[in-house]
Image (cartoon, helix red, strand yellow):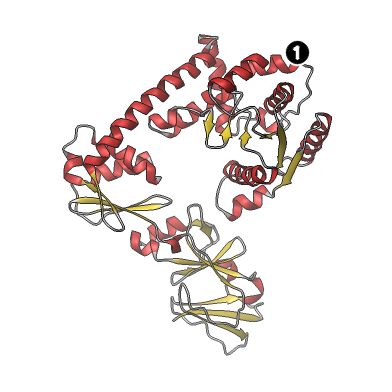
Amino acid sequence: MLNQFLSFIDSNRLFARPDPVLLTVSGGIDSIVMLDLFYRAGFSCSAAHCNFKLRGTESDEDEAFVKELAANYDMNIFHVSFNTEEYAASHNMSIQMAARELRYEWFEETREKAGCEYIATAHNKNDVTETFFINLSRGTGIKGLTGIKEKSGNLIRPLLFASREQILEYAMDRQLAWREDSSNATTKYARNKIRHNIIPEMEDINPRFIDVMFENVLRLRETGEIFQQALEEKKHQLISRDKRHLLVSVEKLKSDEFARTWLYGILSDFNFTATVVDDVMKSLDGIPGKIFLSPTHRLVKDRDSLIIEPLRQEQQKRYYIENPYLDIEEPLKLCLRIINRSDEFVIPRYPDTACLDFDRLEFPLIIRKWEKGDYFQPLGMENMKKVSDFFVDNKLSIPEKENTWLLTSGKDIVWIIGKRIDDRFKITPSTLKIFQVEVQ
């Protein structure tokens, strides 16, 4: 396997022998085999380990194992711990996405700190097949079916030539020790469902299924490159630009037999999903003015063009209220007051004024735009509600949604400004101090 490893690196020009490489080592069998191969090949490398604090003592034992392993190989080790659950909650993302974002950002920082040219991950042939099915189940174009690449910038994957079965055989022959991640046994996650349920069934049909799928992906990659060349030529025909916007010709698009395919190729660059592309296609014969959003861009269907522009920076910007006595000038003008509760106090019945229980607030408060996955407990309700559903119920248009701000305390939404406060922060008989926020 060592010769295959060296041949794969050379044939795909992953790196030159003198280049130092940062190895991402989880403690699992794949990363342990990768580390051993790098060591036996005599390459210059360091190890990096992330503790995501998701499996209690098991995560800490993984970290201790990797540290000891690096010492046995006389290899420099970098390690870090993350509060992954807190990061996921604060950024409204899944645990898996949070862990991915945290580790790759830290790997890049560590690569520079360690003076390495590349970051190596231990993805293998099985990972390519699993990723193929994940993307297929979510809906994708050719690009999403072309799998995990051997090299992307300074990220390399030198084990893509090997199946999980080959990796296990190597580890047993070399009498290597590794850690088993208990979460890999559950079918809670999509990847594990594919790994434990779908792939074994396909291997019953064809024992070479993993190798065949790897070959299929390589052919799809070539097909994707051909399509990309055609797409670039089509873009020159369909797209024009002004100072701020990219304009797609509605007339030329409607007259093209493969309009949806070209439009998906164009809009996927701006993070629009296949579902949104279908909705845009349906709008081509409709009245102008309809708006479509991706996480980063917005598309407006005009009479003659589809107008694409980046979302305004304020869509992702956050503003902090650190001092409850100082009025706020941006993004809104807010008048702030702290009022001692008395029998004479009457709560104003204006939507632009919120009266909150001061002692339940956690400063600094944050003013931000709503994000996918936001929940709050509308005043007068016992259950939580999606902010997006609240918008629908109140028949807010897309521009109105875009121009709505949230006032938050810690992880909780306190007030959809100008619309509704959260029931958990309302004035109650036990309230001693009132925090009044008024939109000027």
Residue 1 visible? The answer is no
Residue 381 seen anywhere in this rendered image of the structure = yes
Q: Residue 321 in the image: state x and y as whole percent.
A: 58, 73
Q: Residues within 10 Å of mark 1 (few under 14, many from 20)?
A: few
Q: Is residue 193 left or right of residue 245?
A: right
Compared across the picture, whether 50 is left or right of 208 comes to: right
Residue appearing at x 65%, y 30% in the figure: 186
The kind of residue on which mark 1 rests is Asp
In the picture shown, does residue 244 fall above or below 366? Answer: above
Measured as percent of width and height from the top left, residue 43 is found at: 70, 27
The residue wearing badge 1 is 173
**Which residue is at a point 71% across and 33% down the rendered structure image?**
45
Residue 118's place in the image compared with 177, above or below, is below
Residue 79 spot, x, y in % from top left: 74, 43
Quadrant the C terminus occupies: bottom left
Report the quarter where the N terminus lies.
top right
Q: Position of residue 204 (x, y in %)?
A: 54, 10
Say above or below: 330 vs 108: below
Q: Residue at x 60, y 42 (%)?
A: 104
